[in-house]
Image (cartoon, rainbow, N blue to C red):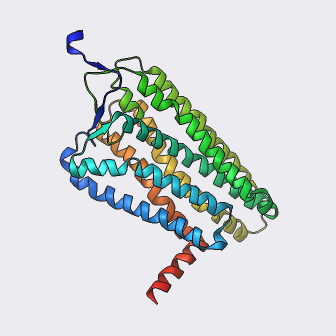
Amino acid sequence: MSDSNTTYFTNPSTFILLGIPGLEAAHVWLSIPFCAVYAIAVLGNFTILFIVKREPSLHGPVFYFLCMLAITDLVMSTSTIPKMLSIFWFNSREISFGACLTQMYFVYCFSGMESGILVAMAFDRYVAICHPLRHSTILTNSVVAKIGLAVMLRSGILTLPYPFLVRQWPYCRTNVIPHFYCEHMAVVKLACADIRVNSYYGLFDLLSAIGMDVFFMAVSYTLILRAIFRLPTKDARLKTFGTCISHLCAISALYIPDLFSSLIQRFGHNVPIHFLILITSVYQLVPPMIHPIIYGVRTKQIRGRLLQLFTHKGA
């Protein structure tokens, strides 16, 4: 392409988000389940935070980690879904370059934090099952706070290169992003440059953060299962393993859509783009909605407190 037909702009003032390309006619209908799921996620996570704050008996490590997970879910989903709904409802497709980079940072940062918090919760389950008498002395409030800070710093530092890498490239021909949010690779594919460094760093981030988290969770559950199988009765084994079900469901809700989405993005070259973006939206929406439901249903203390609230209001 000749220079006269190519316009370079290192920092475009705005990008245009298409939403879900190929399904524009269905945007209004798609907004209904997306809005409902987002509302459930917001209500559920705020309910978790409210109950834990109000109930002194829930002021312990596992519930502090649960609150961290709730805050992370709220920020991650709110970083993308309101903009998606504004595209679907009001055709509000423009997003400034700075807002695009900020959104990208928040999505990847809090996604990494969510994974780290699940590792912390796996560690809590390991201590509770393998060293029950030392649980309160090992996981003190100070240790929980340090773990939370470490998770936040790790994710914040690993995510920092994304906006800087995106910002350095010149962009040409178009500023239209075929997505509902500023997904890293969807943005850099618009650059007139060799973007392999972005792809390599994304893979490094995935392997170093998610890979490390999966490894530590696998080690934790290997030790947990070994301790469970040493218990004398089947009932004791089932009861002890039952305390891990909520956490295992939370892990599945986060990693299965993420893994599926990552594999399709890298290897599914013939997959329709609207299908790929719908899978991404599942990753953005499902974990924040599912986590409070899982812990609300499976955790006796939270379930009991919820029943008390509704019974009190109905009395």
Residue at the extreme bottom of the image, as rendered: 315
Q: Locate the N terminus and report the quarter of the image it occupies.
A: top left
- Residue depicted at x 38% and y 58%: 38
**Residue 76 placement, left or right of 57:** left
Residue 129 in view in this figure: yes
Q: Which residue shows up at 34% across the image and 18% down it?
A: 192
Query: Residue 304 location in percent, x, y?
Result: 57, 77
Q: Is residue 260 above or below residue 52?
A: above
Note whether residue 210 is visible.
no
Q: Quadrant of residue 100?
A: top left
Residue at image position (47%, 81%) is 310
Residue at the top extreme of this rendering: 2
Q: Position of residue 209 (x, y in %)?
A: 59, 38
In the image, residue 25 sits, relative to residue 312, either above or below, namely above
| Residue nearer the viewer, 202 or 78 | 78
Q: Horizontal and vertical percent for residue 93? A: 25, 41
Above or below, comparing residue 305 to residue 130 in the picture: below
Residue nearest the observer in this picture, 133 or 272: 133
Tell me what residue is drawn at x 34 percent, y 45 percent: 278
